[in-house]
Image: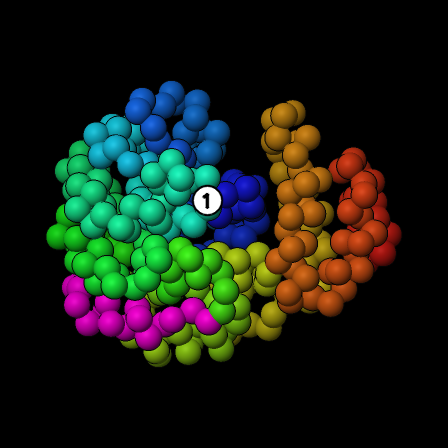
Amino acid sequence: MEGVIDYAMRELLTSSGSYDHAVTEFVRINDMLLPNSTFYKYCPELKQEGNTKSGTPVFVQLLGQHSNWMAENAVRAVSLGAPGIDLNFGCPAKTVNRHRGGSVLLKEPNVVHEIVKAVRQAVPVEIPVTVKMRLGYDDKSQAIENALAIEEAGANALAVHARTKTEGYRPPAHWHWIAKINDQVKIPLVANGDIWSRADALECMKVSGCNDIMIGRGGLSLPNLADTIKNDVAPLSWEEACKLLVRYSGYTRDDKSKNFLPNRIKQWFTYLRREYNQADDLFQEIKTYRQLDEIISIINRKYL
């Protein structure tokens, strides 16, 4: 999730150990081999054996259209310590799709196959290569064809967001379509889309036939969603969520990144407001502030 789940957020959300693995924001691959610094920027966990401090592996996610450059950059990420490579064919962003990246490639299953195969053959066999896709671009007519192409190309697992690109994030997620794909492929399938609670997760697994799920927006809306699903614990209280906001502000970043932190915190409220009624009132109070210290001071004064 570009612009939201940076390494600090990954550290925060994985701290309980309930995630099997996480992925980075996508690294955009064009027609060049990116320098080491780019991979360290997107995945500082590479400096700690590819894991968050809780020990959760972090796969480096690549997005691009050129199979050879995708493969070469995958090799570089692995050489720096990436425990896995994830390939993004799910991004619905207009800018990304206009430059032939993300979900627009689902119109060309042969290209998807070529990219996955090139990456799988380039990196060591012990390194997992996983893929994320949507059900299609304009419609779902090529969903199974794309999934079979990804499987034949050698992917270790496939996560499916249960909507097309044109459906965006509008409900509902079509979990039954994941079940159709599950009937056709043999590689592990991971279900994704509209999982906001433990009840959603259980229903998604039942409908899709998948044993594994991937959460994104739901994990931001309810920061301990993975814990509620895996260990059946109570949802995080608003006070506890505020403590996480303060912890998030304290993670070490370079000076340039710190300048963006107030906006990242405000962006997080887009998701928190779905779960917590108090989040909207707090957002209205902090939205005009630009200094991190001012925002944290308000949170501490009102709720902690």
User: Percent x, y for residue 295?
Assistant: 79, 44
Is 196 located above or below residue 120 in the figure?
A: below
Residue at the spot x=35%, y=79% of the render?
Answer: 206
User: Percent x, y for residue 55?
Assistant: 43, 47
Name the quadrant containing residue 39. top left
Q: Is residue 201 left or right of residue 212?
A: right
Q: Is residue 111 left or right of residue 292?
A: left
Residue tagged 1: 94
Say if the magenta span includes residue 128. Answer: no
Picture quarter with the C terminus: bottom right
Residue at the spot x=49%, y=69% of the render?
Answer: 171
Q: Is residue 8 left or right of residue 151?
A: right
Highlighted magenta segment, given as a residue range = 172-188
Q: Nearer the viewer, residue 198 or 2?
A: 2
Q: Amino acid at mark 1?
A: Lys
Which residue is most to the right? Answer: 301
User: Percent x, y for residue 237?
Assistant: 69, 67
User: Percent x, y for residue 27?
Assistant: 40, 35
Q: Nearer the viewer, residue 62 or 231?
A: 62
Name the quadrant containing residue 294. top right
Is 113 located above or below residue 138 in the figure?
A: above
Q: Is residue 272 visible?
A: yes
Residue at the spot x=17%, y=37% of the render?
Answer: 118
